[in-house]
Image (tube, rainbow, N blue to C red):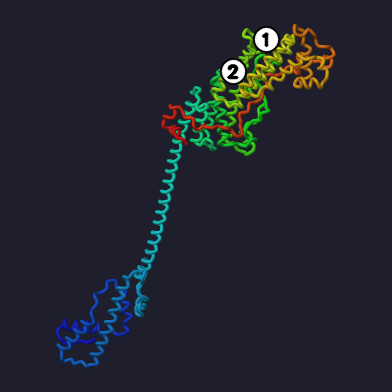
């Protein structure tokens, strides 16, 4: 330590300067430890200021000469002190740098960090933990944000789904309302009306079914409503010939439009025509009491479709429902026709010439002509009309024959046979004028007339009977001949040997009488239906003017 005599204050300054400059290299570690461990570091003392102060002291005290070596030594110490000061500053600055880019420590910096107090090391570790915690917090925040977005998206999707469901429900309610209105206008409240040769209800209802996609599974509510409404109309108009022909024609048009646009194979499309049904007929000699309309019903198209494919087809079901309604209308019409005919049939078939010179069979043909007009007005398909009037002719044939062989045999004479044959000819002529191929339905009556008019002895030979009256059984031939008796036109009775050639019969035997209640089931199915101009049929103005049914105004 360098001390100079003088004032106390100066001695003190020299002492401090000497203390700072007399630090050796061995004290570097202590200095580093002192600097790094100081909780409140002092303001650094510049080595240049110390050197300058020392030189001033030397100039003010010339009594204390210094050698050049001493000056050099002081310079070196000053440089070392300056270097330490710089390193301390760098170390202080390094502690404020970002942890992501740590400064590379110098050799002395490593030594300083080695002796770094635990508090600073803990602060550094805490900074690293805090940074890691910040990263985790950021990840957690992102996860929560993603979860919230997911929940929000799910909420929006649910709301959209509920909205779509509500819209779909409203759409179905609107469609159901329109369907009810449509069925009411075209079926429930409809009076017979025709256009382009069709009952307008048929084509217009079919277009509505296409518009509402009713032929697609799951959307066939309109089909059920139409079928139910038509069946209701048929049952409510059992005695109304005009309305029944309208709904019969409508059902047939719908059936064949469906077959044309949505064909079903022949095995599934229609009931077999060789099946029969039982109807209630007047004056049935066998006393049949039919229960319901159908006696032996063939499987419906819907049943056959479901059996073959394992699920219900709405088109097949619709066809089955329409066939049932059409069959009911057909039977009601037939029963109504027979009830009118039976009042005049027997008298007109066996009576003599009337006042106008024509056979009284004209009463029968008059009734038939009136019914034919109703069918023509309703535009019932010609094949169905042929079936219908063929069934009437069959009834005339069987009912008249039953009257011929009834107890008493009042009509088994030559004169009655002649009148009957003339009546049969008139009926055949009427059928031919309407282009009906139904003359074969009167075969039983024609052959009965032949065996009464011919030479009875020829009937002994079986071959002759087969040729003359092959449609009659031996019991029926014997019954006619057994009841035959002479009149003004033929005074001879039937030879006994002819009767002996034929088997005995019981008057009540079913082998003699013919059951008039069993008829062929009508066939409304046409494999390749010809339905021209059906799209030309326009909806009634009351319907087409409604906004909800504006699709009827389309020309497509």
Which element type, helix, strand or loop, lies under badge 2? Answer: helix
User: Which residue is pictured at 66% across the width and 30% down the height?
Assistant: 272
Instruction: Give percent across and percent down for residue 372.
Output: 58, 20
In the image, residue 299 sits, relative to residue 407, either above or below, namely below
The picture places residue 20, in percent across and down from the top left corner, at 25, 82
The residue most toward the front is 357
Quadrant (top left/top right/bottom left/bottom right) for the N terminus: bottom left
> Around disc 1, counting alpha carbons within 10 Å, would you say few (fewer than 14), some (14 to 19), or many (20 or more)?
some
Name which residue lies at 41% across and 59% down. 139
Which of the 4 image quarters holds residue 346?
top right
**Residue 535, image x and y in percent?**
50, 33
Mark identifier at residue 268 = none
Q: Nearer the viewer, residue 226 or 265?
A: 265
Residue identified by numbered label 1? 351
- Left or right: residue 370 compared with residue 469: left
- If you read the primary sequence from the N terminus, does the residue marked by circle 2 or circle 1 appear first? 1
Q: Which residue corresponds to mark 2?
A: 369
Rounded to the nearest whole Å, what is the CA distance between mark 2 and mark 1?
20 Å
Give the answer, above or below, for where 475 lies relative to 553: above
Front residue of this view, candidates 89 and 403: 403
How far across and down, in percent of the image, does residue 217 sit?
54, 37
């Amino acid at each position: 330590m360098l001390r100079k005599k003088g004032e106390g204050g100066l001695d003190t300054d020299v002492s401090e300067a000497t203390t700072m400059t007399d630090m050796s290299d061995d004290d570097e570690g202590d200095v580093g430890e002192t600097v790094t461990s100081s909780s409140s570091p002092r303001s650094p003392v510049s080595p240049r200021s110390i050197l300058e102060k020392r030189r001033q002291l030397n100039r003010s005290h010339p009594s204390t000469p210094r050698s050049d070596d001493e000056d050099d030594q002081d310079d070196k110490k000053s440089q070392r002190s300056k270097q330490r000061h710089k390193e301390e500053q760098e170390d202080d600055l390094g502690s404020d740098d970002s942890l992501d880019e740590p400064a590379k420590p110098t050799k002395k910096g490593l030594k300083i960090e080695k002796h770094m107090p635990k508090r600073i090391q803990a602060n550094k570790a805490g900074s690293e933990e805090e940074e890691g915690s910040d990263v985790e917090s950021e990840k957690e925040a992102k996860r929560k944000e993603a979860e919230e977005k997911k929940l929000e998206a799910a909420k929006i999707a649910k709301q959209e789904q509920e909205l779509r469901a509500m819209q779909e429900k409203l759409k179905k309610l609107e469609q159901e309302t329109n369907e009810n209105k449509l069925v009411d206008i075209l079926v429930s409240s409809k009076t017979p009306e025709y256009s382009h040769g069709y009952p307008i209800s048929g084509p217009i209802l079919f277009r509505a079914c296409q518009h509402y996609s009713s032929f697609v599974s799951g959307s066939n509510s309109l089909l059920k409503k139409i079928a139910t409404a038509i069946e209701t109309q048929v049952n409510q108009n059992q005695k109304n010939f005009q309305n029944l022909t309208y709904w019969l024609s409508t059902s047939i048009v719908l059936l064949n439009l469906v077959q044309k646009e949505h064909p079903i194979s022949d095995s599934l499309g229609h009931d077999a025509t060789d099946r029969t049904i039982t109807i209630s007929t007047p004056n049935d000699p066998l006393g049949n009491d039919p229960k319901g309309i159908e006696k032996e019903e063939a499987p419906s198209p819907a049943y056959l479709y479901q059996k073959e494919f394992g699920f219900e087809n709405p088109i097949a079901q619709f066809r089955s429902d329409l066939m049932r309604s059409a069959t009911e209308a057909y039977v009601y019409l037939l029963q109504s026709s027979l009830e009118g005919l039976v009042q005049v049939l027997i008298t007109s078939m066996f009576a003599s010439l009337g006042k106008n010179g024509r056979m009284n069979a004209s009463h029968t043909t008059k009734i038939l002509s009136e019914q034919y007009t109703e069918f023509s007005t309703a535009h019932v398909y010609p094949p169905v009309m042929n079936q219908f009037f063929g069934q009437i002719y069959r009834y005339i044939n069987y009912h008249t024959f039953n009257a011929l062989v009834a107890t008493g045999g009042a009509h088994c004479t030559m004169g009655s046979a002649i009148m009957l044959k003339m009546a049969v000819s008139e009926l055949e002529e009427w059928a031919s004028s309407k282009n009906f191929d139904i003359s074969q339905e009167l075969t039983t009556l024609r052959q009965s007339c032949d065996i009464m008019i011919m030479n009875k002895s020829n009937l002994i030979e079986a071959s002759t009977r087969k040729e003359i009256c092959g449609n009659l059984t031996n019991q029926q031939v014997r019954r006619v001949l057994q009841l035959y008796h002479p009149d003004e036109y033929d005074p001879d009775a039937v030879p006994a040997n002819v009767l002996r050639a034929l088997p005995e019969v019981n008057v009540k035997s079913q082998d003699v009488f013919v059951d008039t209640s069993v008829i062929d089931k009508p066939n409304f199915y046409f494999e390749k239906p010809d339905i021209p101009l059906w799209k030309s049929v326009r909806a009634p103005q009351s319907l087409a003017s409604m906004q909800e049914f504006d699709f009827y105004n389309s020309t497509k």
